[in-house]
Amino acid sequence: EVELVESGGGLVQPGGSLRLSCAASGFTFSRHFMYWVRQAPGKGLVWISRIDGDGTTIDYADSVRGRFTVSRDNAKKTLYLQLNSLRGDDTALYYCGRAGMFTLGGVIATPIDLWGRGSLVTVS
Amino acid sequence: DIVLTQSPGSLSVSPGDSATLSCRSSQFLSSSYLAWYQQKPGQAPTLLIYGASTRATGIPDRFSGSGSGTDFTLTISRLEPEDFAVYYCQQYGSSPNSFGQGTKLEIK
């Protein structure tokens, strides 16, 4: 079955750290860019980061750059999000997502075509 | 950074009618890099449209996307009860990527 399963969330004090994992199955993990997106309770989706297939190019949102680190282990088919220096406004459901690789007139389109169910991080 | 502004914030429509949702970009955006998602309560989002107008696998043709430059539209025809949800646009062509704030489609 093609799926993503996040884990590692929980309750952490301000200033603390957590590491989220996203286990992939059913597809060739190394071929896909991967995303992290978060959603605070009752709020909208917020893009956090994107990493390319071999982990060499990583982009971050300004709100997390320098505090969060994304990595991947293609042998284990797992994506990671290390969250450091956590603050109350980091409280959210954290989703990992797979970037589809669609060809549109010579351009590779990479929307999120597969989402996990999310892992809840509460900073309090 | 590209800011996406969705309007309206909420929309009440009757089943069977059509709904038109807007997504405006703060900068020119190639249509190849604009997607729409649907999110139902308690669920992860699902991809509806990418490349501004290409439906994702399994998405019914009641959903259509259009637009270019800075103005993009998601149109949902013949609304079914299961279509009432929150809809987000996303641009994935420029770093940082970004989502709109969402439009909540409610049953009238």
Image: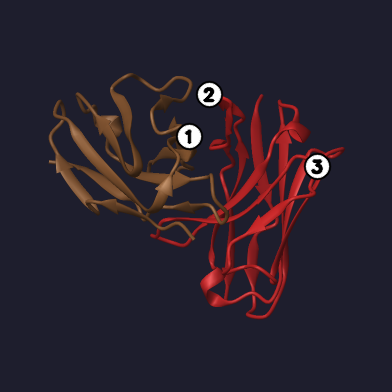
Chain colours: A red, B brown
Q: Chain of mark 3?
A: A
- Report the residue at 39% width, 45% height from top: B89
The image quadrant of residue B101 is bottom left
Mark 1 element type: helix
Q: Which residue is mark 3?
A: A54
C-alpha span from label 1 to label 3: 23 Å
Mark 3 element type: loop
Mark 2 element type: loop
Q: Say few, some or many: other residues with alpha carbon within 10 Å of mark 2 (under 14 / 14 to 19 / 20 or more).
A: few
Mark 3 or 2, closer to the camera: 2
Q: Position of residue B97 (x, y in %)?
A: 53, 52
* In this view, B84 is above or below A88: above
- The one of A11 and A15 positioned closer to us in this rendering: A15
- The one of A94 and A71 positioned closer to us in this rendering: A71
Q: Position of residue A26 (x, y in %)?
A: 71, 26
Q: Which residue is mark 1?
A: B32
Quadrant of the rendering where the C terminus of chain B is positioned: top left
- Report the residue at 71% width, 72% height from top: A84
The image quadrant of residue B20 is top left
- Report the residue at 29% width, 38% height from top: B73
